[in-house]
Image: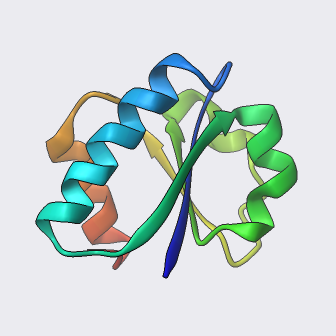
Amino acid sequence: MLKVMVACGNGMGSSMLIKMKVEAIFKKHQVEAQIDHTSVGDAISSAANYDVILCPLSFEGSFNQGGKTQIIGLQNVLSEAEITEKLKNASIL
């Protein structure tokens, strides 16, 4: 099962909205995943435990890009089209 972390500055508002969008997209594409949400600080320390991390574009550079975890930065965290496109580009959908 795919493990996904959604992160934002405080781990409450934006990350929860992104999580809801990702859940809907995965359901539509029949992708089974465990999706968690948290703050960027917590996500950085647990990044290696996830296959994918989605976050606002401004936080993308906070993560180590060299590991197995794919980091996906979002310009518009409310855009289902952007999230879908970036998940497809990362070969997740």
**Which quarter of the figure is the C terminus placed in?**
bottom left
In-image side of 64 versus 59 (left or right)? right
- Quadrant of res 78: top left
User: What residue is at 81 percent from the left and 34 percent from the top?
Assistant: 41
Q: Position of residue 68 (x, y in %)?
A: 69, 78
Q: Is residue 45 left or right of residue 8?
A: right
- Image coordinates of residue 42 in percent, x first then y, are 81, 39
x then y, percent, for residue 16: 45, 30
Q: In the picture, residue 28 is in which quadrant?
A: bottom left
Up-down relation of residue 63 to residue 3 (above or below): above
The reply to whether residue 75 is in sight is: no
| Residue drawn 87% across the image and 50% down it | 45
Q: Is residue 12 left or right of residue 84?
A: right
- The answer to whether any part of residue 61 appears in the image is yes
**Extreme-right residue of the structure:** 45
Give me the residue at 30% from left, 69% from top. 89
Residue 80, compared with residue 26, is above or below; it is above
Counting from the top left corner in percent of width and height, residue 87 is at 32, 63
Q: In screen coordinates, is 15 left or right of 84?
A: right
Task: Examine the rendered structure and indicate whether residue 12 appears above or below residue 47.
Answer: above
